[in-house]
Image (tube, grey):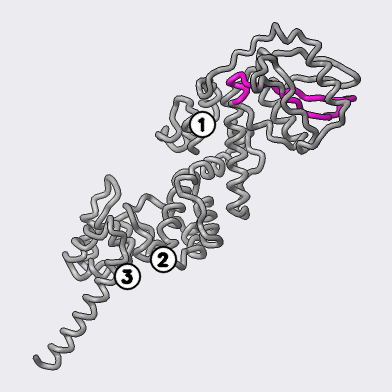
Amino acid sequence: MTLPLLVASRREAKRSALLERQLRRYHPHVQGKIRALAMRHTRLADLAASFPALLLALAVPRTALDPARAITRVIDGQSLADAAAAAGIPLWLRRLPPEAFTRPITELPDDELFRRQIANHLPQLPRLAPIWLQSVATVAELAHAPAAVWIARELVRVPPRTDPARLRLVSLWTWFSTQPTTLGHTLIDRRWTPNMQIGSALAAANAWRTMVALHVSLGSQPIADMWLQPGHVAGYHFIPLNSTADIAEEAEAMQNCLRTYGSNLAHNRSRLWSVRRCGQRVATLRIAVQFADPLPSIVELNGIRNTAVPREVWWAARQWLHAHDLLRIDIAQRKWGTAPLDRPTWRAIWRPYWLAKRQIPEWLPLAPSRRVLNAL
């Protein structure tokens, strides 16, 4: 073999070895189709190193996208920008490694501002790239582009601890945070801002879901049967917490977890009361049936932040309770999980989102569902 042929042979062997290393970096689920496409032409194979995302998009196109035009552009030697545009792939994906791509690439934001911002938050570690890309795509689709930049930054700043599927709740909360005319917005205690850290955002989103659950559990009408009557004993007033507004106000003032009792109240398991003296909140009282006792009793009586209350508050509460004919109170508890959610409230909360996204997703259906709410 002559020297030029030997050099060419070695160069080709080196190129083949480099291509093989790049192809092996793709996920096994997509590697076969990518290999098949790379074998069609050297310019297509070169994408494994120069633009891994574009090679994936051409080999495993997303639904309703015909990659033929983009493939032709690559083979004809046109610019990567032209080929990426034909494939619907943002150029900022060019800097991501093959490890990032485990499935067809969904539509992603690609305006000038987004490109400048996302460039500052690309993952440096290949092992982080798949969850990073999936999370950015999820939040961009379910919320908006600014939130996608935010999650990109947070996943680079701290190791990811959240399954992308769990980002549905964060995305909903983020979206409603920017929609001040919606019912969902009014239920948010702490709204999303781009400078929030992921831990604070997850806590705020969970608190919002609790408020949503309270409202769809009880609906817009007050609880008709509070079992007991308001009263005044030894200077203490016993005031019913029979609406979502009353419960949320008491929870805020007393810094307790009353907002979590929506399902409990809907299943007729307990009733909540506020104990006040001279107009000031002194304690929060929960009445329920417990253990083998068939009569309603005091199961919780706590001050602010669930602190203990003085004995005289307990004494006043018991006098108030036993002033009722407890034997005549019929507490028919619902079997757990059978209390229906309020359909008008459910639709009032989610309708603006459905309209904005032009779809009613399977994971947020038209019919109210506790399973769906718990899965967020």
Label 2 to label 1, Cα distance in Å?
37 Å
Of mark 2 and mark 3, the one earlier in the sequence is: 3
| Residue pointed to by mark 1 | 350
| Residue pointed to by mark 3 | 50
What secondary structure is found at the residue carrying circle 2?
loop
Q: Amino acid at mark 3?
A: Ser
What secondary structure is found at the residue carrying circle 3?
helix
| Residue 98: percent from left, percent from top | 34, 64
| Residue 115: percent from left, percent from top | 46, 60
- The tag on residue 126 is 2
Of mark 1 and mark 3, the one earlier in the sequence is: 3
- The tag on residue 141 is none
207 on left or right of 367: right
What secondary structure is found at the residue carrying circle 1?
helix
| Residue 43: percent from left, percent from top | 22, 69
Taken as a whole, is the magenta stretch helix, strand or loop?
Answer: strand
